[in-house]
Image (cartoon, helix red, strand yellow):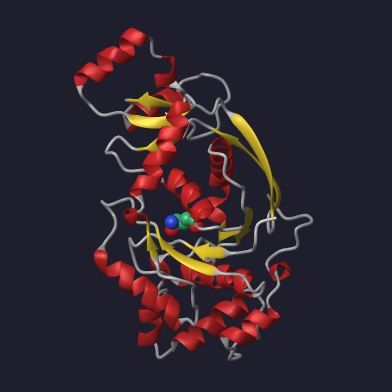
């Protein structure tokens, strides 16, 4: 079994809010409570949305909360060669194909009656192109995206919080038509290269995991374990967002709360402390067990 080394992998596209911070705290607690390494990785491949100032700000906020990590903060933008190599491996195994579909075309095709594709699944339009059609598209000069040939595979895995999860894998994009490597590719390559044994992240990414496990297997990489932790909700029961008010460390500081107060709030929100109780990071490590998050048996999913 892989060690329980973990990571937090934010995208430097905005200020971390309480929900992100709680996921980071939990990922850190999973690793540190098992005496495992904890790494910080900036997922900055979507250059259109990344802003330089958020790298430092996110690192500062995570440090202020009391988290620490091993080694330097890694940036995916420094690791493009590895993703290119992975694409070559997939291509050599005939597991990728070019796709010229626009978003609008995919939306249109997906709403046509064509069986029982889950929502958002790529309907395989470019997989069915004839050799001549493909040559014509290439000649037009518009660059294609690259998709995997997954053939609606089904993947089942044991999530440490959500229990048994089964999901379908569509022909998802591994390299966008602007040349950017896709999250699902980079995350798989990096988690394996960095020796991550336990991926702890928000439950919003649960649906991506079958794709990532499928891809890792095709690339001959070891599969990490997964724990998808509950998302923090606002008072209205909706997933926490900016509109919920004071959701960043800076917002809370303006209300007179220190990062220690915020850590206490986050810990109390998962039952690791009493509301209003001050707790150090070390005390949380001593108290933490994945069982605080949700009983596996009967987990709703
Ligand atoms: N970079 C992704 C995000 O910020 C998280 C990736 C992951 O934890 O696998 O949503």
Task: Work out whether residue 132 or residue 16 is closer to the camera in this orientation and state it.
Answer: 132
Task: Work out whether residue 28 or residue 257 is closer to the camera in this orientation and state it.
Answer: 28
Rendered view: 214 above or below 250: above
Q: Position of residue 162 (x, y in %)?
A: 68, 54
Q: Position of residue 294 (x, y in %)?
A: 71, 64
Q: Is residue 275 left or right of residue 263?
A: right
Residue depicted at 44% across the width and 89% down the height: 258
Residue depicted at 35% across the width and 86% down the height: 254
Q: Position of residue 289 (x, y in %)?
A: 71, 72
Residue depicted at 29% across the width and 54% down the height: 49
**Quadrant of residue 72 within the rendered picture:** bottom left
Residue depicted at 38% across the width and 31% down the height: 146
Rendered view: 25 above or below 85: below
Q: Is residue 219 left or right of residue 46?
A: right
**Quadrant of residue 84 within the rendered picture:** top left
Q: Is residue 175 left or right of residue 38?
A: left
Rendered view: 283 above or below 223: below
Task: Work out whether residue 168 or residue 213 is closer to the camera in this orientation and state it.
Answer: 213
Can the viewer see residue 234 in this picture?
A: no
Q: Position of residue 190 (x, y in %)?
A: 47, 53
């Amino acid at each position: 079994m892989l060690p329980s080394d973990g990571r937090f992998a934010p995208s430097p596209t905005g200020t971390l809010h309480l929900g992100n911070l709680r996921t980071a705290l939990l990922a850190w607690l999973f690793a540190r409570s098992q005496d495992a390494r904890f790494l910080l990785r900036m997922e900055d491949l979507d250059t259109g949305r990344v802003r330089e100032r958020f790298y430092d700000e996110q690192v500062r906020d995570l440090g202020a909360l009391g988290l620490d990590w091993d080694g330097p903060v890694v940036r995916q933008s420094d690791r493009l060669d590895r993703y290119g190599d992975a694409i070559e491996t997939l291509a050599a195994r005939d597991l990728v194909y070019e796709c010229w579909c626009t978003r609008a075309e995919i939306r249109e095709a997906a709403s046509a009656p064509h069986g029982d594709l889950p929502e958002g699944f790529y309907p395989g339009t470019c997989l069915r192109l004839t050799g001549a059609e493909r040559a014509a598209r290439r000649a037009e000069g518009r660059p294609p995206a690259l998709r995997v040939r997954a053939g609606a595979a089904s993947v089942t895995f044991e999530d440490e919080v959500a229990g048994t999860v089964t999901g379908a894998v569509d022909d998802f994009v591994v390299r966008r038509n602007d040349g950017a490597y896709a999250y699902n590719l980079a995350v798989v390559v990096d988690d394996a290269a960095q020796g991550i044994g336990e991926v702890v992240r928000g439950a919003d990414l649960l649906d991506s995991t079958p794709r990532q496990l499928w891809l890792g297997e095709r690339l001959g990489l070891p599969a990490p374990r997964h724990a998808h932790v509950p998302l923090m909700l606002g008072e209205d029961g909706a997933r926490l967002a900016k509109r919920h008010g004071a959701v960043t460390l800076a917002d809370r500081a303006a209300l007179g709360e220190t990062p220690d107060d915020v850590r206490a709030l986050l810990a109390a929100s998962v039952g690791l402390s009493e509301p209003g109780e001050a707790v150090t990071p070390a005390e949380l490590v001593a108290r933490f067990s994945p069982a605080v998050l949700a009983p596996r048996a009967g987990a709703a999913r």
